[in-house]
Image (cartoon, rainbow, N blue to C red):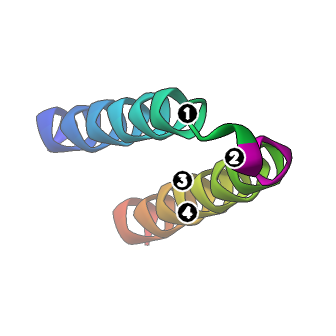
Amino acid sequence: MKVYVALIIIVGIIALISTLMLGGRGDADYSESTGRNVTNLTLIYVIAILGSVIALAIFVFI
């Protein structure tokens, strides 16, 4: 079970890093909105990861 949790966390971190790396690339015309998009995606990842950890904790301890 611990292996699965570790794998989920690793995949989530890789997805976050990949999104941030790709979000930095953009056309000159879209550079103003890129920062906002990266912020929104980061917020989505943070909420998803926190929700997953809370759901996992509830599942394991109850």
Q: Which residue is mark 3?
A: 49
CA distance for labels 2 and 4: 15 Å
Location of the N terminus (image quadrant): top left
Q: Magenta span: helix, strand or loop, mainly?
A: helix
CA distance for labels 1 and 4: 16 Å
Provide the secondary structure element on which disc 4 rests: helix
Provide the secondary structure element on which disc 3 rests: helix
Q: Which residue is mark 1?
A: 20
Q: Residues within 10 Å of mark 1 (few under 14, many from 20)?
A: some
Q: Which residue is mark 2?
A: 38
Q: Which residue is mark 4?
A: 48
Residue 55 on the magenta span: no
User: Three-letter amino acid code at disc 3?
Assistant: Ile
Sequence-wise, which precedes: disc 3 or disc 1? 1
| Cβ atoms at labels 1 and 2 below 8 Å apart | yes
Spot occupied by residue 37 in the image (x, y as percentages of width and height): 71, 55
Say above or below: 10 vs 39.
Answer: above
Sequence-wise, which precedes: disc 1 or disc 4? 1
Q: Nearer the viewer, mark 1 or mark 4?
A: 1
| Cβ atoms at labels 3 and 1 below 8 Å apart | no
Q: Nearer the viewer, mark 3 or mark 1?
A: 1
User: Three-letter amino acid code at disc 2?
Assistant: Val
Residue range in magenta is 29-34
User: Three-letter amino acid code at disc 4?
Assistant: Ala
